[in-house]
Amino acid sequence: MTKFSVGPVISDHLGTLEDERTHTARWQDWAMLYGLPAAAGAPLAIWNVQLQGIGEVVGGLAILAGFLFGLVVFVFQLRLQVTADPRVAPQGLLPRLLDQLFANVSYAVLVGFMTVGVSIAASATRSLDAKTGDLMAVNRWWSAVLVLLFAHLMLLLAMSLKRLRRAYQELKR
């Protein structure tokens, strides 16, 4: 079963949410990355908001998750190249930033695949309208979870982009 465990991916990502100097958790990062998506999703359940067009969402998320998987492979390759470059200090900031980027993007792939799976489940469990026979919107619970996961994924991508930019700045030095 350990071959299928995603625990290390999650723990590696969570390890990037700490202060570099004190090695303590940064509550601001946790609040932004987990609290903000929860705050975005909860009102949908409370106010009975239901998502429409879930088929398009599934397709877009699947493509995004696939691109993210390709990005993980690219960051892996980049880390190998940096390791072989004698101009880069092995314990320097650039390798550390790339390691953090790898952890964040790997976790984003996991969240992306999970969001695709939840989207498929939400789409597959929609009810039929008794009068028209058409599929109804996604119920409020699925809608809330999907918005939460999507917001979380977008914040992960923003964090990864910031980290990639910081690595690029370090490389220019």
Image (cartoon, rainbow, N blue to C red):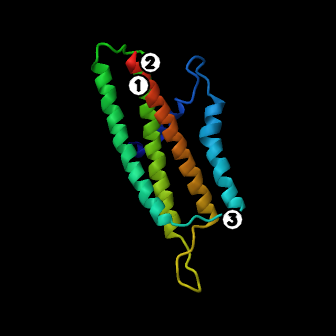
Residue found at the very far right of the displayed protein: 46
Q: Earlier in the sequence, mark 2 or mark 3?
A: 3
Residue at disc 2, secondary structure: helix
Per the rendering, the mark at residue 153 is: none
Residue at disc 3, secondary structure: loop
Q: In this rendering, would 44 be left or right of 74?
A: right
Residue at disc 1, secondary structure: helix
- Give amino acid for label 2: Leu
Q: Earlier in the sequence, mark 2 or mark 1?
A: 2
- Give amino acid for label 3: Asn
Residue bearing mark 1 = 168
- Give amino acid for label 1: Tyr
Q: Position of residue 12 (x, y in %)?
A: 48, 32
Check whether the beta carbons of the residues at disc 2 and disc 1 lie within 8 A of each other.
no
Is there any visible trace of residue 12 in the rendered image?
A: no
Q: Classify residue 51 by image quadrant.
A: bottom right
Q: Label 2 to label 1, Cα distance in Å?
A: 11 Å
Per the rendering, the mark at residue 93 is: 2
Q: Nearer the viewer, mark 2 or mark 1?
A: 1
Q: Residue at x 62, y 47 (%)?
A: 37
Residue found at the very far bottom of the displayed protein: 131
